[in-house]
Amino acid sequence: MHKTICVYCSSSEALSPSYFQAAADFGAFIAQRNYTLIYGGGRIGLMGALARSVHQHGGQVIGVIPQSLQDKEVGYNNADELIVTKDLRDRKAIMEARADAFVALPGGFGTFEEIFEILTLKQLQLHTKPIVLVNTNNYYHPFVQLCEHVYAERFAKPDSRLLYHLVPEPAGVFPYLDTYQPPILPNKWF
Ligand code: AMP
């Protein structure tokens, strides 16, 4: 079955080459595994590296970009489909609705916001799709520590660990997706 994968990742150009390499590797896997990429539609940072790699390996790319960012000319105009939305909220809603799985490569505030929203919706059982964080250079280690602090202080149940999955490198994403079973989650509230 043809599936769509939503990827959240950095728009920064200032990162170490290892992050760009991981984004390019992931793009190649997406195309080889016959997934369509849906993402924020940028041509800069890891977003651009990812989208170009999907195309170089024969895959399909859907970009979803708000008008304001398109006006700043950071859009990836080679996307097979470029959806220009009114604002950032519309953009997230389209990406969420069309994706079968969510993957975050390293990123900054924009990426965190997207991760937390998709986790929050899953916590509330408003979707049951897989969420994977690619832990290149151990970038997401402090994120995991923050989550553990949240559980230790009982702001969320430790079962919340079932909401997301970390993999050390892009190759690890697909075995997880292939065998994914939605977790049986307890009620969110204590
Ligand atoms: P950040 O992690 O702060 O670099 O933000 C990246 C995330 O936010 C991406 O997953 C995008 O969906 C969104 N985003 C932020 N900046 C841009 C941009 N210039 N073009 C397109 N999307 C962006």
Image (cartoon, rainbow, N blue to C red):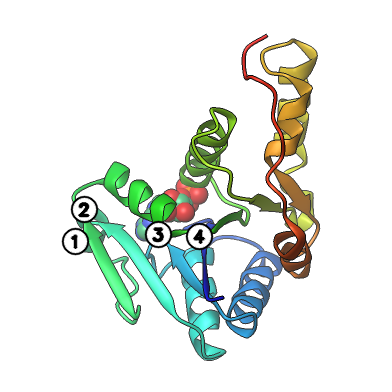
Compare marks 2 and 3 and give the one earlier in the sequence.
Answer: 3
Mark sitting on residue 33: none
| Residue wearing tag 2 | 68
Quarter holding residue 77 = bottom left
* C-alpha separation, residue under disc 1 versus residue under disc 4: 23 Å
- Per the model, the C-alpha gap separating discs 2 and 4 is 21 Å
User: Pointer 1: what residue?
Assistant: 71
Mark 2 C-beta closer than 8 Å to ligand 1: no
Residues at marks 3 and 4 touching, judged by CB atoms closer than 8 Å: no
Say which residue appears at 76% left-offset and 70% top-offset.
171
- Among the two numbered marks 2 and 4 on one chain, the one whose residue lies closer to the N terminus: 4
The image position of residue 37, as x and y in percent, is 49, 70
Q: Split into 4 quadrants, where in the image is the N terminus?
A: bottom right
Q: Earlier in the sequence, mark 1 or mark 4?
A: 4
- Percent x, y for residue 101? 57, 57
| Residue depth check, mark 3 versus mark 4: number of the one nearer the observer | 4
Q: Is 69 placed left or right of 40 in the picture?
A: left
Q: Are marks 1 and 4 in contact (CB under 8 Å)?
A: no
Q: Which residue is mark 3?
A: 40
Q: Which residue is mark 4?
A: 6
Residue type, numbered disc 1: Asp
Q: Secondary structure at mark 2?
A: helix
Q: Position of residue 60 (x, y in %)?
A: 45, 81
Task: Give the residue type that dot 3 points to.
Answer: Gly
Q: Are marks 3 and 1 in contact (CB under 8 Å)?
A: no
Disc 1 crowd, CA 10 A, few/some/many (<14, 14-19, 20+): few
